[in-house]
Image (cartoon, rainbow, N blue to C red):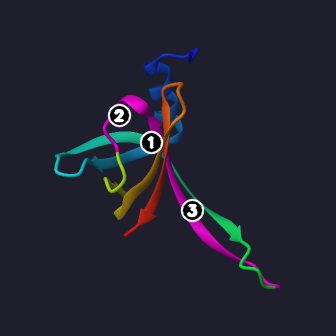
Amino acid sequence: MAVETAADRLVMLTDFGQSVTYTVQGGSAATITAIFDNQFVEVDSGGTVGFSVQQPRLTCRTQDVVNCTEGDTFVISGATYLSRIVQDDGTGMTEIVLEKQ
């Protein structure tokens, strides 16, 4: 069980996150606050030289994305992403692996 409240989580997201437009497939758009991370990750392709790819992820309150499934749309800083993996951590926060469109 989480120690913090939904309001505590929103304060953290407001301090470190940004506004994101979230649209459930077949639904209407909503604005949520989330932390967007688009780090580069090294991929081992089996050769002598590795290469890197971007790994976009979104961290948000679970209550803001209750119905999120693969293929929902997120618009972040003008770029459109689709949700690919939705990971509810059981403490009120969800991490969503994204794919840029």
User: Where is residue 60, by image quadrant?
Assistant: top left
Label 2 close to label 1 by CB (< 8 Å):
yes
Q: Which mark is residue 79?
A: none
Q: Is residue 48 left or right of residue 11?
A: right
Specify whether residue 76 is painted magenta: no
Mark 3 or mark 1, whichever is nearer to me: 3
**Disc 2 secondary structure class:** helix
Residue bearing the label numbered 1: 34
Asked whether, in this view, residue 33 is left or right of residue 59, the answer is left
Find the residue positioned furthest to the bottom: 48
Q: Amino acid at mark 2?
A: Asp
Residue that appears at 31% across and 38% down: 67
* Cα gap from disc 2 to disc 3, whole angstroms: 22 Å
The residue located at (61%, 72%) in the rendering is 53
Does residue 65 belong to the magenta stretch?
A: yes
What residue sits 53% from the left and 40% below the top? 16
Q: Which residues are magenta?
A: 48-68
Comes first in the chain, label 2 or label 1: 1
Image position, residue 7 (x, y; %): 43, 20
Looking at numbered disc 1 in the image, what kind of residue is underneath it? Ala
Pointer 2: what residue?
A: 64
